[in-house]
Amino acid sequence: MELMLAYDNSRNARITLDAVKEMFGPLHPNVTLVTVVEDVGSATSGADDLFNEQYADQKEGAEAAAAELVAAGFTATVMLAEGDARKMILRATEERHPDLLVLARHSHQPDSGPLGFLTQRIDALVQEFDHMTFGSVSAFLARRVKCPLLIIPTHEAAASIQAAE
């Protein structure tokens, strides 16, 4: 079985990684983790630094997730792409033909951190803009992807994570 997991190293992606291990562990599928670094859209050196930092973080997070899958008995590879996440994930499914694409349904709860309040406000604004213009990644893929799609809800798991902290 060939699984493709859209992975951005967020809290929701980590919840989805755990769900994949739990649901598909006995099958020991081959998993391709697809991580997409989106261009910041600026030609300044500061934007280049931000992109390079994001690229390194995404790569490191995806490689750590792949190592976690391998330790659990899966075969895992990482596919790193640059561009629009929706289009790059769609392209990856067209090139690799997985039996199933798995991704998180991103909630309106961003990763916690020292700037949590500000991050929540910015995230809400970006989410609203995305829905007005393009729709979410999962909605885009649900309309276009040719393989079955499994969208893992993360809102319940997020509440249990916060309770554990």
Image: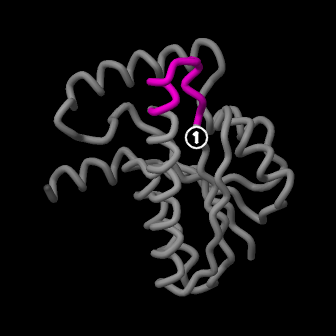
- Which structural element holds mark 1? strand
Q: Residue at x 86, y 55 (%)?
A: 95
What span is colored magenta in the figure?
A: 38-49
For label 1, the residue is: 37
Quarter in which the C terminus is drawn: bottom left
Q: Quadrant of residue 130?
A: top right
Above-or-below relation of 15 to 21:
above
Q: Is residue 111 left or right of residue 149?
A: left
Residue 36 place in picture, x, y as percent: 61, 44
Q: Is 40 included in the stretch rendered in magenta?
A: yes
How busy is the neighbourhood of tag 1: few (under 14 within 10 Å), some, or many (20 plus)?
many
Instruction: Determine whether, in the image, residue 119 is placed left or right of residue 162.
Output: right
Query: Where is 147 relative to 51, above or below?
Result: below
Residue 123 is situated, as x and y percent measured from the top left of the image, at 38, 25
Q: Is residue 23 left or right of residue 96?
A: left
Camera-side residue: 9 or 98? 9
| Extreme residue in the front direction | 45
